[in-house]
Image (cartoon, rainbow, N blue to C red):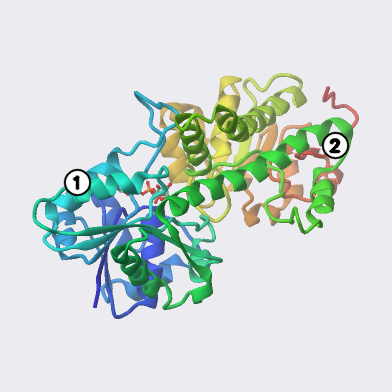
Amino acid sequence: MTNILCIGAGYVGGSTMPIIASHCPQHRFVIVDINDARIAAWQSDQLPIYEPGLDEIVHQTLGKNLFFSTEINRNIAEADIIFVSVNTPTKMFGQGAGRAADLQYWEKTARQILENSTSSKIVVEKSTLPVRTAEAMERILNSNGNGLHFDVLSNPEFLAEGTAVHDMQNPNRVLIGGRETEAGQKAIESLVEIYAHWVPRERILTTNLWSSELSKLVANAFLAQRISSINAISALCERTEADVNEVANAIGRDARIGSHFLRASVGFGGSCFKKDILNLVYLCEHYGLPEVAQYWEQVVTMNEYQETRFAANMVTSMFNTVAGKRIALFGASFKANTNDTRESPALEVCRALLAEQADIVITDPHAMENACYDLKELATRVVFEPDPYIAARSAHAIAILTEWRQYTELDYEKIHHSMVKPAFIFDGRNLLDHKRLYKLGFNVYPIGKPPLTHSLINHS
Ligand SMILES: NC(=O)c1ccc[n+]([C@@H]2O[C@H](COP(=O)([O-])OP(=O)(O)OC[C@H]3O[C@@H](n4cnc5c(N)ncnc54)[C@H](O)[C@@H]3O)[C@@H](O)[C@H]2O)c1
């Protein structure tokens, strides 16, 4: 039996470790966190994160070979392999503020591992980290004077929230980076063996440490770049009466381009894309590559433009004022099937409309609690309403900000009847049947397509 510890019971630690535990019943898994409430929630009926399929896996393994705990020091001492999945947000102070990764949580963890270890261990970076962080981790860990040896591996997590269970059960690749020394290769093999319980060997890629660390940043930069690329084109489509869905379909048929991740929208969100690109930008600047840094920074700038443009379009379309108008925001999470609201475009649109003195009602099937927390400084100015029908009642407009399937199944005729006329729908996800909505009497504003408006409306 191997004792496997994961430090950090957030989205990554909490969703990956139960799945690994379910495939490796012979090993013992403990997940620890400094956040007592989070650890308690993982052991309750109300898990702290919403992720389809995760409840069953946690309940299958909990108390058998999976344990949650706040006793970090003791569990470090007992562990053979330690995954570190603490948060690495953008640094908001001092050198590199607004760009570099804030490594304080990560470094505290490294020192805590050092202080509490009485045997040699493999330490696995699961958090997303700047390239060459493992070097610093090795230096801290191997500064012990008692002959212990630590092998540091990089094993970045590629799961997407909302499909985390599926992604983890059927990964298109698992990436493990390590030192090219004998000890490093042995450590890599130990981790390969764990994943090989359910992942075909040819999907387990092994590389040097720096390629592995950098690949995670590059993967997120490329994914976000595709969204910003199609969103840039959506703005041009709106000026030229081209239809961005038709353009995406036409270009996506080229196998060199591919059809995935070409959906125009109000913008990307989530805790990772912006932070990881800014981290990449910072690294490029640090290594004296300003042109490369500027190239990638534009992906973030484009995303901010798309969010701002969406909110501004709402205001101009509604006769240049939304002051005192009730507007229902459908969706608060940054994408469907998660309760994560970090960097959600919905919250950016909300803030922009509040600045225009609109009366905002937010509805979401799973993310209301997080949205309420994120908007706490504006809480008195926002109504949180779980029922979308009630949210839309007496509203001038609805904005679709998360692609929850539930929103495709609503009775929009009933909703239209309950709204102030003329009634507007701004579909930030191109989710709904726009022609049908138009026939029901709505003025419909999709992304990257001509709006469908009734004649009284001046949308110039
Ligand atoms: N969320 C994603 O979809 C995703 C995907 C891939 C990679 N990542 C990366 O994984 C890392 C974690 O992301 P997340 O979304 O799970 O973050 P998170 O904020 O949800 O979770 C991090 C957890 O670490 C805990 N923590 C912080 N310092 C600690 C310490 N010293 N000891 C014990 N626990 C500590 C926090 O309390 C928190 O619960 C980040 O580097 C992120 O970039 C995230």
Q: Does residue 67 lie above or below 134 as drawn?
A: below
Question: 187 or 455, which lies in front?
Answer: 187
Question: 414 or 14, which lies in front?
Answer: 14
Q: Give the CA separation, mark 1 to mark 2.
A: 57 Å
Q: Which residue corresponds to the image point at 64% horizontal and 40% vertical from the top-left?
A: 392
Label located before the other in sequence (1 or 2): 1
Label ID, residue 123: none
Single out the residue that lies furthest toward the right: 455
Q: Give the quadrant of residue 267.
A: top right
Q: Position of residue 153 (x, y in %)?
A: 35, 58
Q: Position of residue 348 (x, y in %)?
A: 56, 32
User: Is residue 280 found left or right of 97 in the rendered image?
Assistant: right
Q: Which residue corresponds to the image point at 52% horizontal and 38% vertical from the top-left?
A: 277
Q: Does residue 364 lie above or below 201 as drawn?
A: above
User: Is residue 398 found left or right of 212 in the rendered image?
Assistant: right
Quarter placement of the C terminus: top right
Instruction: Say which amino acid is labelled 1.
Output: Arg
Question: 174 or 394, which lies in front?
Answer: 174
Instruction: Say which amino acid is labelled 2.
Output: Pro
- At mark 2, the secondary structure is loop
Q: Disc 2 designates what residue?
A: 450
Q: Which residue corresponds to the image point at 44% horizontal and 43% vertical from the top-left?
A: 370
Q: Does residue 289 lie above or below 270 as drawn?
A: above
- At mark 1, the secondary structure is helix
Q: Give the quadrant of residue 39.
A: bottom left
Q: Position of residue 79 (x, y in %)?
A: 20, 65
Q: Is residue 385 visible?
A: yes
Mark 2 nearby-residue class (10 Å; few <14, some 14–19, many ≥20): some
Q: Disc 1 designates what residue?
A: 111
